[in-house]
Image (tube, helix red, strand yellow):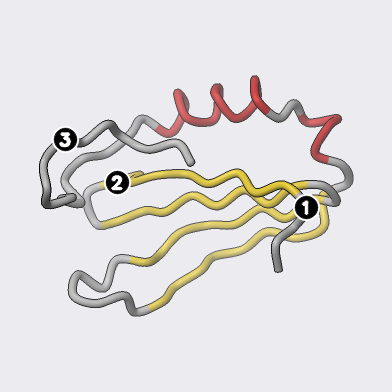
Amino acid sequence: MIAPRITEKEKSRNWTLNYEVVQGIIDELVPAPVRGKGLSSGLLSATCMPAKDCCGTEQDYQNVTIYFNRGAAGLSYAVVQWGRGR
């Protein structure tokens, strides 16, 4: 998981990350050739209480799934999951 370092007890969605910086980190951790063939990508929208902020995008590859969570304020965090955890 790539997320802002937040030391407060309450994890406000006002803490955001720069998408280009996060993409650069992911590209370094999991270069495109290591990900495998691209299988699908799409938008995810779920109702997560109380803020209703579980929206994002997902990129599914042969070897890894990459999820970007976006709240109303911007990119909240990203998750790189090996082995396609579905």
| Measured Cα–Cα span from mark 3 to mark 1 | 31 Å
Q: Position of residue 7 (x, y in %)?
A: 16, 35
Q: Quadrant of the C terminus?
A: bottom right
Q: In screen coordinates, is 53 left or right of 23?
A: left
Q: Secondary structure at mark 3?
A: loop
Location of residue 14 with respect to 84 vertically, above or below: above
**Which residue was labeled with disc 2?**
74
Q: Position of residue 57 (x, y in %)?
A: 53, 57
Identify which residue is drawn at 37% across, 66% down: 54
Q: Nearer the viewer, residue 3 or 54?
A: 3
Mark 1 or mark 2: which is in front? 1
Tell me the quarter of the picture where residue 6 sits.
top left
Q: Give the residue type that dot 1 points to.
A: Gly
Q: Give the residue type that dot 2 points to.
A: Gly
Q: Give the residue type that dot 3 points to.
A: Thr
Mark 3 or mark 2: which is in front? 3
Location of residue 2 with respect to 63 vertically, above or below: above
Tell me the quarter of the picture where residue 29 sits.
top right
Identify which residue is drawn at 39% across, 44% down: 77
Identify which residue is drawn at 72% across, 55% down: 60
| Measured Cα–Cα span from mark 3 to mark 2 | 19 Å
Could you say which disc has been placed on residue 83 in the image? 1
Q: Secondary structure at mark 1?
A: loop
Identify which residue is drawn at 85% across, 51% down: 62
Q: Position of residue 70 (x, y in %)?
A: 37, 53
Q: In screen coordinates, is 24 left or right of 5?
A: right
Q: Earlier in the sequence, mark 1 or mark 2?
A: 2
Q: Secondary structure at mark 2?
A: strand
Q: Nearer the viewer, residue 19 or 85?
A: 85
**Which residue was labeled with disc 3?**
7
Location of residue 47 with respect to 14 vertically, above or below: below
